[in-house]
Image (cartoon, rainbow, N blue to C red):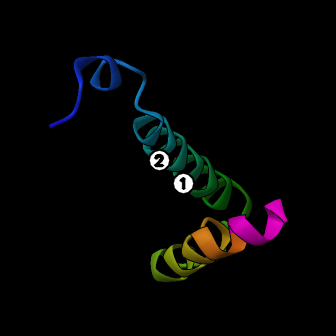
Amino acid sequence: MTPNSIRSTLNYENFELIGDTILKVMVSIYGIIKLTDEGEGELTVIKSKMASNYNLARLCI
């Protein structure tokens, strides 16, 4: 059982999820605007590499 005082605090995991989603949308928009010659499949691969948790963690270190 979790005390009510702990459950009522902010859930930072929700903020992390929202932030990750916004970042991936922004990377997608960037790819559409800047990489106009690439196909849909290639844009998906590029977005996955640019916004992967692994690469983002490397940037933070």
Q: Which mark is residue 21?
A: 2
Residue 30, position in %: x, y?
Answer: 67, 53
Residue 25, position in %: x, y?
Answer: 52, 48
Determine whether label 1 and label 2 are within 8 Å by CB. yes
* Quadrant in the picture for the N terminus: top left
The residue nearer to you, when weighing 23 against 45, is 23
Q: Residue at x 82, y 65 (%)?
A: 59
Above or below, 52 relative to 24: below
- The outermost residue toward the left is 1
Within the magenta stretch, is there residue 24?
no
Per the image, the residue denoted by label 1 is: 24
Location of residue 3 by image quarter: top left
**What is the magenta range?**
56-61
Question: Viewed as shown, does residue 5 lie left or right of 35?
Answer: left
Judged from the image, the secondary structure of the residue bearing numbered disc 1 is helix
Above or below, 54 relative to 19: below
Label 1: how many residues lie within 10 Å, few (<14), some (14-19) or many (20+)? some
Number of callouts: 2
Location of residue 58 by image quarter: bottom right
* Quadrant in the picture for the C terminus: bottom right
Q: Magenta stretch: dominant SS? A: helix
The residue nearer to you, when weighing 56 against 47, is 56
Q: What is the C-alpha distance between the residues marked 1 and 2?
A: 5 Å
Q: Residue at x 70, y 65 (%)?
A: 56
Q: Residue at x 32, y 17 (%)?
A: 5
Above or below, 8 relative to 57: above
Residue 44, position in %: x, y?
Answer: 50, 74
